[in-house]
Image: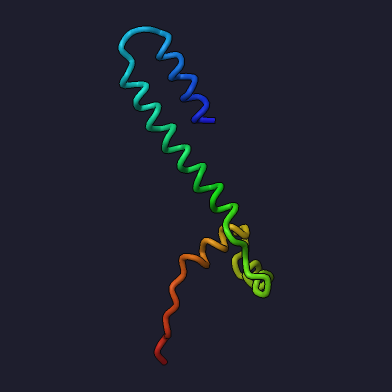
């Protein structure tokens, strides 16, 4: 919604007259930031899913997270051997 609103604001600035290039530039920057965030959200949703064998265990451990968020946690992990 923000990107659509900023697009309309660019049209308004363009047709209103005057030197509003600075406002248009900032609007374009914000549209690019929002488009990148939308891309990241879609990429995370379409990312590989949870392993079939561990799906029930992972869902019970990470209560409140959906499958995409659990998969992100699994991708960001590091394994370490704990000394005894």
Quadrant for the C terminus, please: bottom left
Residue 63 to residue 4: above or below: below
Residue closest to the far top: 17
Q: Quadrant of residue 54?
A: bottom right
Residue closest to the far bottom: 84
Residue 34 to residue 58: above or below: above
Image side of residue 9 versus residue 24, left or right: right
Q: Horizontal and vertical percent for residue 75?
A: 50, 65
Residue drawn at 67 percent across, 75 percent down: 53
Image side of residue 78 versus residue 19, left or right: right
Q: Horizontal and vertical percent for residue 21?
A: 32, 18
Q: Front-most of 42 and 64?
A: 42
Q: Horizontal and vertical percent for residue 45?
A: 59, 52
Q: Horizontal and vertical percent for residue 22?
A: 31, 21
Q: How many marks?
A: 0
Image side of residue 32 versus residue 51, left or right: left
Residue drawn at 33 percent across, 15 percent down: 20
Residue 69 to residue 26: above or below: below
Residue 7 to residue 44: above or below: above
Q: How is the image coloured?
A: rainbow
Q: Quadrant of residue 1?
A: top right
Residue drawn at 52 percent across, 26 percent down: 4
């Amino acid at each position: 919604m923000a990107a659509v609103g900023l697009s309309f604001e660019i049209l308004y600035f363009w047709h209103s007259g005057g030197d509003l290039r600075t406002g248009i530039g900032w609007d374009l920057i914000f549209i690019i930031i929002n488009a990148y965030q939308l891309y990241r959200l879609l990429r995370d949703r379409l990312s590989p899913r949870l392993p079939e064998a561990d799906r029930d265990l992972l869902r019970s451990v990470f209560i409140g997270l959906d499958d995409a968020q659990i998969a992100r946690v699994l991708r960001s992990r590091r394994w370490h051997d704990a000394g005894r």
